[in-house]
Image (cartoon, rainbow, N blue to C red):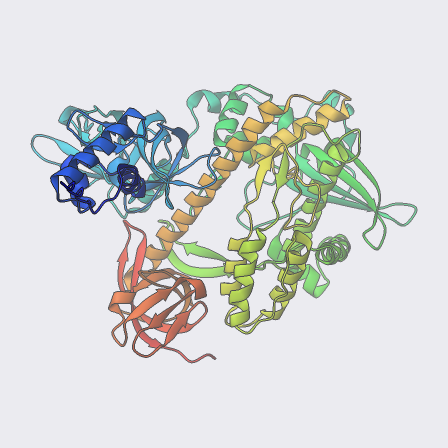
């Protein structure tokens, strides 16, 4: 009697089936399936094959490759890998974990944010490690901030604060007894108190009422709160500053190089109140020039760890908003004791150079001095002398200008990059309402000061750290790393499509030469501002660090910030370290300064973001009365949602949404920085001139919305 043949299954051997089951889960490590669902996915229908599938699942579970939970679900046994880092939020409510331990950022979906906010330091569990690494927040290690700004929504039983931050998708629950006088519709500051595990919203208490949305002070104070920038000094700090004497001590002057009899000038913006740098000049018997670069000696008054120093460390920088300055130091110091005001004796820390007529340095000296400023010039006054050759101290101004131009030319020949972007400024009325816009562009008088400040920063750093016996000294460097060659390659390809030649480059020196040639070629073209903007985006960001990698943009191997201790804490550190080495002391530990460098870099970024937010608010406020008007504009950016248009006469930027351009359906071409019409093939790209109509000015979101009118022919 012949044996019956075994019925074959469509899944083959059990080993082959086990591989198929494993492959199913590996494709999506987050997949959770029961036995029936596994069979359904693998199209297993007969009873024998279903039994083999169960056997495969059991074997994989026993091997620890997959897990079997109490609900009968199987899933990949992903090793629990926790990564710590900071959350970089998006306007959709999701975030990316940025961690020094990871090459790529980890995506955190909004539903996996837990109780974390953008900026928080968190612990994240990696849930998927495919093409796009994903994770979920399992712990908030440190809050980035405890205070949040928003608008109050008050009812008879409870209240909520709806935050201004579009990256935060939860509202704060405010018990009525924690409102502290806040009323519906007011802009206020909430302090986060708690966020219970079972609660959908964090609990908070109102700590300050800012005013009504759209009001200048309310919006500017909201910006300061948003970026954690205190606009008042604690009373004990002000009291301590008030006790500092204005008068100089002759015994202290005797310890310094007395340069009060040397002609000394300051050149600053017309609205400056703190003068932290001055220039002195005298011709020596050998015909050379002695140029003194004198910087306010803040460290004479602010000692490490004292009351003012602790506050200055926290702030790390002054912040320059459109209508006010939030200083790093109390006014008694920044505008009084330390400020190099005309006709007053002052303590300074100086870099003094002997130069010949070709601006070659033949000698240098660094140390503490006393000076007397003979005259305060605005940039405009100094420029009139440079252009007209007449005025107070004309010989001194013209000599400074001549030497500075030679320094500048030499710097560019060595590879420094020349970006000459215009700065937008607002003319404000007595209520801080913008009534006009003007553009600030650097002229010879600005460049004069810039060159001598760069010289001092460079030479101080070389003095401290250049040479075999000095290279390991602890110091605070201002570093700017080389551009990423891959980013530059992408930029170069785009620029060539616009018709501009730019040489290929694979290292810092070649890239800087290529960029400088390009900057010369594009001057005066419609693409100039757009290309300059894109070029800047290819560059690394300058930061403070104890490790020196040089300053690429300036083409300096050694560079620090020495010239603005009234408004930058790193300059205070540089002054202290310079004096430390002048006194012949050994190099201190790097760890202390490394931490301060990281903090100062972070605070600098916050200040820059706040300054941009205040400019954006004033731009929207300035345009709010012009809704319905048409403007000539330049395309300043493109995205998947729309094109950004910058009004030519005001430099105010807003968006034209792609969905609202009627004459064609446009889609985003990311690679070529443009949007393309699917019907006509029309391209709209950076630098194109268009006419737009202002539809809406939203003061709360600081946004302008335009509608597209027509494309303009190039002038």
Can you see residue 618?
Answer: yes
Q: Is residue 436 left or right of residue 277?
A: left
User: Which residue is the extreme one toward the left?
Assistant: 156
Image coords of residue 159 (percent x, y): 14, 33
Image coordinates for residue 633, horizontal then vertical, percent: 39, 69
Q: How many marks?
A: 0
Residue found at x 79% / y 30%: 257
Reply above or below: 229 against 658. Answer: above
- Residue pictured at 35% horizontal, 64% vertical: 668
Left or right of 32 on screen, residue 409 = right
Q: Is residue 674 above or below residue 474?
A: below
Q: Position of residue 434 (x, y in %)?
A: 38, 55
- Left or right of 3 on screen, residue 565: right
Whether residue 35 is situated above or below residue 582 in the rendered picture: below
> Who's the residue at 54% across and 20% down the image?
243
Along the line of sight, the residue nearer the viewer: 708 or 344: 708
> Which quadrant holds the N terminus?
top left
Quarter of the image holding residue 343?
top right
Along the line of sight, which residue is nearer the eye, 192 or 531? 531
Inspect this view and state whether residue 440 appears. Answer: no
The image quarter in which residue 52 lies: top left
Q: Residue at x 55, y 28 (%)?
A: 596
| Residue 370, percent from left and from top | 73, 32
């Amino acid at each position: 009697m012949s044996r019956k043949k075994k019925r074959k299954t469509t899944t083959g051997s059990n080993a082959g089936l086990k591989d198929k089951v494993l492959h199913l889960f590996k494709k999506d490590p987050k997949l959770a399936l029961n036995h029936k669902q596994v069979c359904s996915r693998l199209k297993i229908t007969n009873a024998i094959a279903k039994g083999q599938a169960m056997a495969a699942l059991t074997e994989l579970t026993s091997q620890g490759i997959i897990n079997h939970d109490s609900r009968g679900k199987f899933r990949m046994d992903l090793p629990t890998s926790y990564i710590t880092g900071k959350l970089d939020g998006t306007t959709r409510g999701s975030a990316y974990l940025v961690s020094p331990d990871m090459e790529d950022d980890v995506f955190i979906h909004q539903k996996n944010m837990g109780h974390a906010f953008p900026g928080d330091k968190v612990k994240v569990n990696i849930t998927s490690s495919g093409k796009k690494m994903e994770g979920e927040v399992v712990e908030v290690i440190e809050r980035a901030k405890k205070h949040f700004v928003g608008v109050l929504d008050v009812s008879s039983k409870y209240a909520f604060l709806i935050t201004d931050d579009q990256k935060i998708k939860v509202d704060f629950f405010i018990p009525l007894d924690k409102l502290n006088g806040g009323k519906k519709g007011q802009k206020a500051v909430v302090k986060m108190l708690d966020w219970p595990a079972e609660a959908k919203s964090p609990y908070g208490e109102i700590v300050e009422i800012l005013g009504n949305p759209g009001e200048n002070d309310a919006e500017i104070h909201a910006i300061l709160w948003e970026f954690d920038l205190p606009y008042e000094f604690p009373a004990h700090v002000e009291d301590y500053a008030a006790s500092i004497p204005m008068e100089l001590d002759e015994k202290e002057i005797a310890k310094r190089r007395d340069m009060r009899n040397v002609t000394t000038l300051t050149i600053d913006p017309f609205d400056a109140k703190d003068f932290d740098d001055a220039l002195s000049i005298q011709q020596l018997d050998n015909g050379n020039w002695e140029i003194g670069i004198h910087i306010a000696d803040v460290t004479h008054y602010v000692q490490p760890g004292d009351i003012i120093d602790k506050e200055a460390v926290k702030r790390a920088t002054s912040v320059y908003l459109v209508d006010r300055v939030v200083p790093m130091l109390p006014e008694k110091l920044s505008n009084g004791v330390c400020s190099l005001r005309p006709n007053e004796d002052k303590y300074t820390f100086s870099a003094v150079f002997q130069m010949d007529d070709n601006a070659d340095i033949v000698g240098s000296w660094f140390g503490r001095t006393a000076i007397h400023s003979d005259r305060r010039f605005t940039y405009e006054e100094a420029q009139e002398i440079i252009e007209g050759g007449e005025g107070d101290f004309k010989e001194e101004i013209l000599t400074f200008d001549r030497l500075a131009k030679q320094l500048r030319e030499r710097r560019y020949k060595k590879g420094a990059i020349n970006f000459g972007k215009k700065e937008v400024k607002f003319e404000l009325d007595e209520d801080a309402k913008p009534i006009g816009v003007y553009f600030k562009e650097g002229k010879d008088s600005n460049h004069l000061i810039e060159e001598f400040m760069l010289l001092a920063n460079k030479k101080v750093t070389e003095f401290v750290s250049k040479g075999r016996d000095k290279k390991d000294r602890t110091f605070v460097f201002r570093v700017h790393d080389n551009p990423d060659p891959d980013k530059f390659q992408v930029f170069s390809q785009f620029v060539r499509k616009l018709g501009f030649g730019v040489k290929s480059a694979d290292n810092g020196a070649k890239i800087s030469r290529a960029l400088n040639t390009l900057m010369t070629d594009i001057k005066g073209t419609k693409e100039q501002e757009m290309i300059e903007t894109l070029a800047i985006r290819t560059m690394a960001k300058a930061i403070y660090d104890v490790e020196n990698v040089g300053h690429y943009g300036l083409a300096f191997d050694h560079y620090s910030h020495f010239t603005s201790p009234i408004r930058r804490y790193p300059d205070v550190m540089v002054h202290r370290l310079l004096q430390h080495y002048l006194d012949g002391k050994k190099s201190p530990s790097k760890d202390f300064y490394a931490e301060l460098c990281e903090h100062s870099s972070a605070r600098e970024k916050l200040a820059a973001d706040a300054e941009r937010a205040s400019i954006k608010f004033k731009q929207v406020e300035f345009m709010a009365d012009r809704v319905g008007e048409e403007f000539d504009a330049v395309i300043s950016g493109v995205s998947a949602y729309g094109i950004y248009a910058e009004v030519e006469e005001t430099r105010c930027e807003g968006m034209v949404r792609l969905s609202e351009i009627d004459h064609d359906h446009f889609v985003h071409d990311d690679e070529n920085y443009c949007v393309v019409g699917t019907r006509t093939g029309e391209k709209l790209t950076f630098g194109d001139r268009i006419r737009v109509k202002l539809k809406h000015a939203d003061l709360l979101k600081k946004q302008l919305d335009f509608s597209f009118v027509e494309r303009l022919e190039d002038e």
